[in-house]
Amino acid sequence: MAFAHAQAARRHGRPAMRTAAVALAGAAVVTLAPSATAAAPAGVDAQAQLQAFITDGSSTAAFAEVRQDGRRIWRGAAGTADLDTGQPVRPDGRFRIGSVTKAFVSTVVLQLVAEGRLRLDDPVEQYLPGVVPGGGAISVRQLLNHTSGLYDYLEDPRFFYQDEASLRDYAYGSRRWQDHRPEQLVAIGVAHAPYFAPGQGWKYSNTNYVLAGMVIRKLTGNSWQSEVERRIVAPLHLGDTVFPASETGLRGPHAHAYAKLPEGPADITRLNTTVADAAGNGISTPADLNRFHAALFGGKLLRPAEQAELKRTVPTGSGTTFYGLGVAQADFGCGPLWGHDGGLPGWGTLLFGTADGKRQVALSYNPYEGTDPSGLDAAVVDVAVRTLCDGTKAASADAAAGLAALH
């Protein structure tokens, strides 16, 4: 499927891939202008941080919203939603949320735990017999916190792009339209040797969450999408949040995604996200994601026992980032914050906030695929620092590396 620089792709959990280490030669230069933003109270204004995403040409658009105690206190946008028409970005637009989907999936699994329908330390083999070699030694918990050792199917070479030719093939060929069944994705993952024995390390693997989605179906008889919609989307009235099947477009206002080619930008907005499945196929808005974060960390979706499991972390090796069950704890320089980042080719997302769910920021940006993404991690951290740390703290030197550990 999708193709992106290795470090940025894996950090986001995007269907992930590699390209050349340098920007593709001869690509067109696009001039972008900031769009209007809502007024912000003193101490909350991340417009300069949003502008940084597009200043060097590595992104075509960025927008974000900050909430405090359920009230929007700032939102802004920068860049161009449609390079053909010059339409400015709307800060309320929809976008592909990538691996932020994992937080929705893990919440459903934890609700099933609360209902007595499974235990976190049950083996995967109990629910999906014969699907995972050695599945008797891998627990559901190890799927959710990425300690299973299972190979990430999106690191298989068939999902990479390495050069201009393969990026063009992704943009104009048939790959973006292909259907993938979860069983097929898992089969690709388990065909590779595991990274380590179960519980003996930490490695981000999208295979884990495809399996979690399959466990949900096995226990409920419904797709994981149906259960997320019934248990989370509908009760929270997240009217702009969907988890599609094979539908390739985004309904409603949205920024487009692009690949940078010598002949000009290639629109890669449309995508069959069955390739991401329960690991990352969601679509949402900043407002909806912030409401979800507030409900999840405010204790409205899980009982205290399951809430404690959600936030029981394991080290990722970065020193600043720890992983729970579908959510991460990260230190951007002002103490621990909770959330996830995500991405798909041409899309990047950040959703982080305080442990009590009282304050959060949701960010969407559109990496210009085929350009050097090396500055994007720092730009993401700068938005988090400005909005969640009230701009009073300098970004931790290790904060961007901590986000990079989520791969």
Image: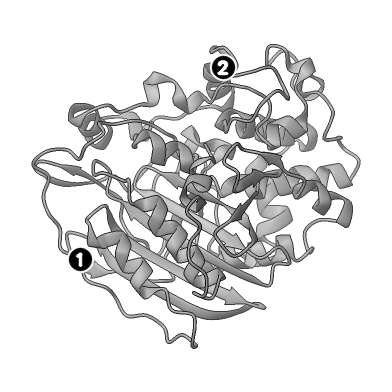
Where 28 sits versus 13, above or below? below
In which quadrant of the rendered view does residue 239 lie? bottom right
Q: Residues within 10 Å of mark 2 (few under 14, many from 20)?
A: some
Look at the numbered disc 1 and give the secondary structure of its residue: loop
* In this view, 341 is above or below 197: below
Residue placed most toward the observer, 11 or 300: 11
- Which label sits on residue 32? 1
Q: Which residue matches tag 2?
A: 187
Residue 267 percent coordinates (x, y): 24, 48
Q: Position of residue 406 (x, y in %)?
A: 54, 41
Q: How many marks?
A: 2
Q: What residue lies at 40% left-to-right and 67% top-to-bottom?
A: 63
The x and y percentages for residue 288 are 57, 65
Measuring 53% from the left and 13% from the top, which residue is drawn there? 192
Q: Residue at x 63, y 34 (%)?
A: 209
Residue 194 seen: yes
| 208 sits to left or right of 364 | right
Q: How much space separates mark 2 and mark 1, taking CA atoms?
A: 43 Å
